[in-house]
Image (cartoon, rainbow, N blue to C red):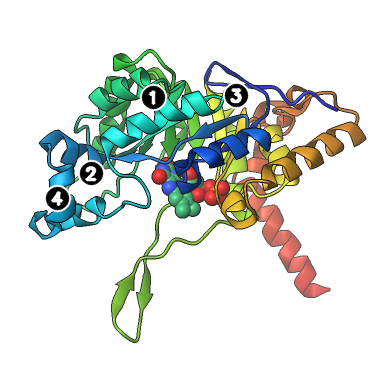
Amino acid sequence: MANLESTYLGLQLKSPLVVSSCPLSYHLDNLRRMEAAGAGAVVLYSLFEEQIELAEMGFSSYYTEHNEELPEALRHVASMKEYNQGAGSYLAHIYQAKQAVSIPIIGSLNGYYNSGWTRYARLIEAAGADALELNIYYLPTKPHITAAEVEQMYIDLVRDVTESVRIPVAVKLSPYFSALANISRRLVGAGASGLVLFNRFYQPDFDIVNRAIIPSLDLSVSSELRLRLRWVALLSDQNDVDLAITGGVHTAEDTIKGIMAGANVVMMASALIQNGIGHLSTIENELNQWLDNNGYKSTKEIRGLLSHAQIGDSAALERANYLNVLRTARSQEGS
Ligand SMILES: Cc1cc2nc3c(=O)[nH]c(=O)nc-3n(C[C@H](O)[C@H](O)[C@H](O)COP(=O)(O)O)c2cc1C
């Protein structure tokens, strides 16, 4: 059996398979099952900025009963019982999670505006989290807000948080930056120890019969991995930072691709929601088998084998490849 040990955010993990932030981590029993199935670490479901706002106002329990008095944008939060119940119980959950399992527990803050993030980052640290993931979820829809302003907001937020805690901080990024390599470098400069590529955005659908916008959250498919592979392969030699892939990891093959691109760990949510937590051990077995069959003794040996630095062929990852794809498509049309 190969050695699957990995390092991520300075943490020593027994495996590169990490559970991505999602409701599966809400139950302590699930955390135990994740550990038993071979998870190297778990990123907990997020504490949302809106919940912090309510907690800061001291109103969270009051508004559970008087929901209609809340501003519309905050109404859904008080009823998110099945997901999580507020800032206090989130901190309690971290503490209990640390008692329940011995694998690293990574807290998660989700939002875009620094309304108490630094204080909650410190509380998450005090509750025992081994690291913190920041999911900065901001959709810049206002025409007067420039890309430079948005980027500066990210940098300031990350700097504020990293300066307030001692635990390592990872930033879960969106793929929609104009200059991803540049913002990545600046986030690392602002103190990020890890980058998590990429956030998968909630994309509402349109109901054309009832003329309504319907909330929709589809689970991912493996083909979504390609965007992540390309960027991890490109970024892995540019910064001294750990990289995690989230989005489209469903199989052992996906895992191998992610590590070969240069990721320290791969994260999974959809695959575990779809197939159950036990899917982790299926992937672990298949990963072991593949490494054995191909003569590798550890995941470290395959890490970065297909990164930009190793293949030395920018064209394969960048635009020039587009021409090859078009050429191939044309020749197939002609045959
Ligand atoms: C039901 C569900 C809930 C999620 N909740 C969170 C969350 O609270 N915080 C977060 O950062 N990401 C959240 N995510 C995103 C996942 O962590 C992950 O980044 C994304 O689903 C892509 O990974 P996947 O292809 O393995 O699903 C959620 C995803 C799903 C499917």
SS at mark 2 in the image:
helix
Q: Where is the C terminus found, in terms of image quarters?
A: bottom right
Q: Is 63 displayed left or right of 173 in the figure?
A: left
Residue type at tag 3: Asp
Which numbered marker is on residue 50?
2
Residue type at tag 2: Glu
Residue under label 4: 63
Residues packed near mark 3 inside 10 Å, few (<14), some (14 to 19) or many (20 plus): some
Q: How far across and how far down the image is residue 204, in percent? A: 37, 65
Residue type at tag 4: Tyr
Residue under label 1: 186
Q: How far across and how far down the image is residue 208, in percent? A: 35, 83
Q: Is 144 displayed left or right of 324 in the figure?
A: left
Residue under label 3: 237
**Tag in front: 3 or 2:** 2
**Tag in front: 2 or 1:** 2
- In the rendered view, tell whether residue 119 sits above or below residue 61: above
Residue type at tag 1: Arg
Separation of marks 4 and 1 at Cα, in angstroms: 39 Å
SS at mark 1 in the image:
helix
